[in-house]
Image (cartoon, rainbow, N blue to C red):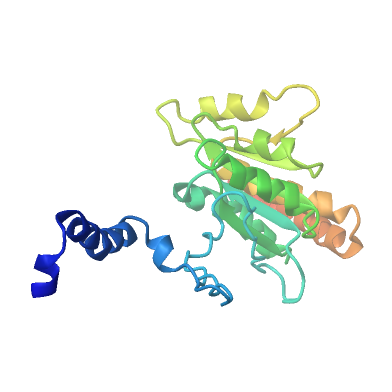
């Protein structure tokens, strides 16, 4: 300390700068502190600590899980896809599912909105043929564009079911489903549960064109309906 005080003022200021200025420089530029000494190799770069990109952020199409229903052969892929615009439509679309179960036709059922999830709806239709489907049944209410959107993304036949979920009692859904432009047909059924039931029957008839066993089941179904009418007629006539 005594020797420092005996030094000239200029030399003392230089020593202060060396002692305190260099650490401050390191604080301002930490890269200088990591600089390797002469003759030593540079240290390895730090590991990548950034989290991996999130999965399924919309850029990758969803993976569809085939729900095997309506068939005793559990290894058989779904032949019919039932799509509804909202889970509130399930009560109506179950009518189509009941018909497919009756004829033991495997199907899968999901929800996809033409307006709230257009990419999901498009991906479902675009991949349906590769997944072994032969027919798509789409049910929606209000501005029911779901069947048309699905038909625009596939060459498979699309059956539309207008659902009476608005104050217009399904008339809006009927017009939105049936009024398709040339080139994108949609086989439009009646409004509500009768239409959903007919959608299941029509899907069975389409598949039966290439399946003789299913065609025989449909023939028996027609005969049973005729027999029921005869039975009801006799009951009325006997009054």
From the viewer's side, name the closer residue of 115 and 146.
Answer: 115
Is residue 215 in view from this perspective?
yes
> Does 35 appear above or below 192?
below
> Does 130 appear above or below 115?
below
Q: Choose top left, top right, bottom left or bottom right for residue 69.
A: bottom right
From the viewer's side, name the closer residue of 98 and 8.
Answer: 8
Residue at x-position 62% and y-position 56%: 62
Q: Is residue 7 left or right of residue 181?
A: left
Residue at x-position 48% and y-position 52%: 91
Image x and y of residue 58, in percent: 57, 49
Residue at x-position 49% and y-position 31%: 142
Is residue 1 in view from this perspective?
no
Number of numbered labels in the structure image: 0
Image x and y of residue 201, in percent: 72, 50
> Does 9 appear above or below 190?
below
Q: Quadrant of the N terminus?
A: bottom left
Q: Choose top left, top right, bottom left or bottom right for residue 227.
A: bottom right
Image x and y of residue 81, in percent: 68, 54
Image x and y of residue 233, in percent: 65, 46
């Amino acid at each position: 300390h005594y020797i420092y005080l005996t030094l000239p003022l200029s030399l003392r200021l230089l020593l202060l700068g060396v002692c305190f200025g260099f650490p401050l420089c390191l604080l301002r530029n930490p890269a200088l502190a990591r600089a390797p000494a002469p003759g030593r190799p540079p240290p390895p770069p730090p590991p990548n600590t950034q989290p991996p990109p999130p999965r399924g952020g919309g850029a990758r199409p969803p993976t569809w899980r085939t729900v095997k229903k309506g068939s005793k052969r559990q290894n058989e892929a779904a032949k019919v896809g039932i799509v509804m615009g909202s889970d509130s439509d399930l009560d109506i679309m179950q009518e189509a599912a009941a018909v497919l179960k009756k004829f033991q036709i495997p199907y899968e059922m999901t929800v996809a909105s033409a307006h709230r999830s257009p990419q999901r709806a498009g991906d479902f239709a675009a991949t349906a043929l590769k997944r072994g489907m032969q027919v798509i049944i789409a049910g929606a209410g209000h501005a029911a564009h779901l069947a048309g959107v699905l038909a625009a993304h596939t060459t498979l036949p699309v059956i539309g079911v207008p659902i009476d979920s608005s104050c217009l009692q399904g008339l809006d859904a009927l017009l939105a489903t049936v009024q398709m432009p040339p080139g994108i047909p949609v086989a439009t059924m009646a409004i509500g549960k009768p239409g959903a039931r007919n959608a299941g029957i029509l899907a069975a008839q389409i598949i039966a064109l290439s399946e003789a066993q299913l065609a025989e089941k449909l023939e028996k179904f027609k005969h049973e309906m005729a027999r029921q009418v005869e039975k009801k007629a006799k009951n009325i006539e006997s009054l």
